[in-house]
Image (cartoon, helix red, strand yellow):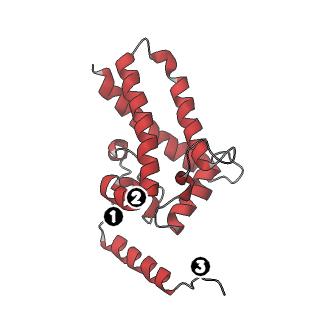
Amino acid sequence: MIGLPLGLLYENAGEWLVHRYVLHGLGKRPESYWSFHWRGHHRACRKLDFYDPDYEQPAFAGPLLTPQRKETLGLLAAAVAHAPLLPVAPWFSAGFYYGLVRYYRVHKRAHLDPEWARAHVPWHYDHHMGPNQDANWCVTRPWFDYVMGTRVPYLGTARERADRARRAGLRRHAPDTTSSA
């Protein structure tokens, strides 16, 4: 039974490693397959106050390689790569697979409901909306951010309140592009 929490911990370490070194490390290169994360997902979140419209449709609907589909394919690849462990370490595998499913569900919900994210995954909100987007790598639980010293709180700080007020002011003064002439 010790395998179950070890599988969860392992999945969280994977979140941290993949997010930091693949999605940001390789993803900041424009020619990279992983650039969707930095150039699409992060840009949308900053522009739309953490909301990302790519999560509105099912993962396998629409164009062939949407950012959400690439994320889902990455999770499925991790699941397949770890399948040989299932008969050898079933509890570890169960923890790992639960973590993958939870990652997808939490990440999707967070970017469709930013207020839910602020309340339930503030570390992920901090990752996207804080001044340092190269911190707070975990999505589902901040465990490895604490272990690796990369957890940097932003939500609820004076800086975050000032940033939200500034963004609200910008929206209030933006020209209305929805009405027709």
Question: What is the C-alpha distance between the residues marked 2 and 1?
Answer: 7 Å
SS for dot 1:
loop
Image point (45%, 36%), residue name: 14
SS for dot 3:
loop
Q: Which residue is mark 1?
A: 155
The answer to whether the residue labelled 2 contacts the one labelled 3, judged by CB atoms less than 8 Å apart, is no
Quarter residue 9 falls in? top left
Residue type at numbered disc 2:
Tyr
The answer to whether the residue labelled 2 contacts the one labelled 1, judged by CB atoms less than 8 Å apart, is yes
Residue type at numbered disc 3:
Thr
Q: Determine crowd level at label 2: few under 14, some 14-19, many 20+ residues with C-alpha closer than 10 A.
A: many
Q: Determine crowd level at label 3: few under 14, some 14-19, many 20+ residues with C-alpha closer than 10 A.
A: few
Image point (35%, 63%), residue name: 154
In this picture, residue 23 sits left or right of residue 62: left
Image point (51%, 67%), residue name: 48
SS for dot 2:
helix
Q: Earlier in the sequence, mark 2 or mark 1?
A: 2
Question: What is the C-alpha distance between the residues marked 1 and 3?
Answer: 31 Å
Residue 82 visible in the snapshot = yes
Image point (36%, 77%), residue name: 162
